[in-house]
Image (cartoon, rainbow, N blue to C red):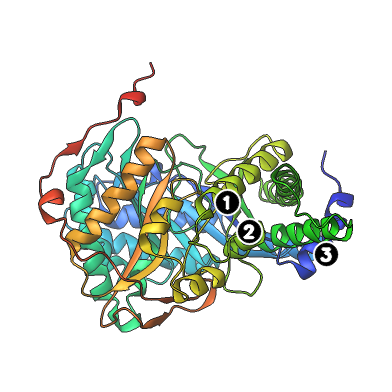
Amino acid sequence: MINLQEVIETNKMIEQEHLDVRTITMGISLLDCADKELTVTCEKIYSKITTLARHLVQTGEDISKEFGIPVVNKRISITPISLVGSSCCRTPGDYVQIAKTLDRAAKDVGVNFLGGYSAIVSKGMSKSDELLIRSIPKALACTERICSSINVGSTKTGINMDAVRLMGDIIKQTAEETQHADSLGCAKLVVLCNAPDDNPFMAGAFHGVSEADAIINVGVSGPGVVKHALEQMDKKQWNSGDGQLANFEVLCETIKRTAFKITRVGQLVAQEASRRLGIPFGIIDLSLAPTPAIGDSVADILKCIGVEHPGAPGTTAALALLNDQVKKGGVMASSYVGGLSGAFIPVSEDQGMIDAVEAGALTLEKLEAMTCVCSVGLDMIAIPGDTPATTIAGIIADESAIGMINQKTTAVRIIPVVGKTVGDTVEFGGLLGYAPVMPVNTFSSQRFVDRGGRIPAPIHSFKN
């Protein structure tokens, strides 16, 4: 059982070390909203979301006040819309109408983001899937709260290279449609491999078809807490008088115990939100998700472990260690750890990562290597606006291959900022922070991505 004493023990983490519940996300199935008439589908979608989620924001705020735990975001994830709109959408414009309905519903219930303007095309695209994908640039340009995700591959099916190639074009078009806001639309668009059904974090959240009609998922974060714990560990070791750093066994145990405490806070909030809303609890996602705030940084944890800057030799090993211990601590604290639990490494949202890029320590290629062992992938990376769509598709293919072969979720959220080049800085604001524009390999991948078809599933996928 979780009790308030456990929360009291974490007061210092909350007040001084940036511990928070990053999001309470309500997953809502919209399968029963599908209709042959677009207007009817939109009416059903709006009605169901505003009915089920009408108390979501207030509940999060009430819990935050009563327990003294910051609940930063309240969000909604929905059934991939390509499934819901398949009977009534005949053009990309029809899907844009659904996007506007979703945005209006999100605004009216007060959530900051709604995820699930999505399609699952890891083995092939239906006509509905393609229409939705082609609608994304306009949909993200005319809405404020909608997040879009496309799953282009999985360990069981391989990689749909036709979808990968198309997404290169869609990302470029989205950048152009939102160039007035430094191509911000791309910050709400992610391309995934092995996307989980229960992810509470944007922009990749959607409500999987295997989920209940409605569910509560909670995402907890606390990189500042882990950083402080490691600093105290080394200080204690130094004060012991032997002049040695804490060894890896002590370091791993410190991270694991800290992750346990963080997860218990999230478990309490999740259970309380579930009880008050009358909606089943799904999972806790224990992800070290950074913010632009000083000290709330995964990069700073890596520096505490021992690398001068993220990107230095040893960085990938340090990140692998961190990710593993966070998960071990999480599964000890809760029986329902899911989503993308581990460590995120978005560039724009992590001041330490930004510093590493500006110092010349961290490159796109090194970030790709780090994604082999972290929670997701290439996240919130600004690149020159003139980067070819085929190059973006090649980056997506590389990251999808890492996910497919390693049986893990990988993603690409990359922003070709129109009018910007290497050396420029892009301001996104809020939790999205700012980002230096990073250089991209200029050698062409066009012949590779233009082949089309599907990269087959790896041999180790055949387990039946």
- The type of residue carrying mark 3 is Lys
Q: Which residue is mark 3?
A: 12
* Rendered location of residue 364, percent (x, y): 37, 62
* Rendered location of residue 259, percent (x, y): 71, 48
In terms of image quadrants, where is residue 221?
Answer: bottom right
* Rendered location of residue 26, percent (x, y): 55, 51
**Pick the front one: 263 or 446:** 446
In the image, what residue occupies the spot 45% across and 63% down?
A: 105
Rendered view: 251 above or below 308 = above
Rendered view: 113 above or below 175 = above
SS class, disc 1: helix
Q: Earlier in the sequence, mark 2 or mark 3?
A: 3
Left or right: 457, with 451 as reference point? right
Q: Which residue is mark 1?
A: 318
The Cα–Cα distance between marks 2 and 3, rounded to whole angstroms, is 25 Å
Q: Residues within 10 Å of mark 1 (few under 14, many from 20)?
A: many
Point out the frontmost of discs 2 and 3. Answer: 2
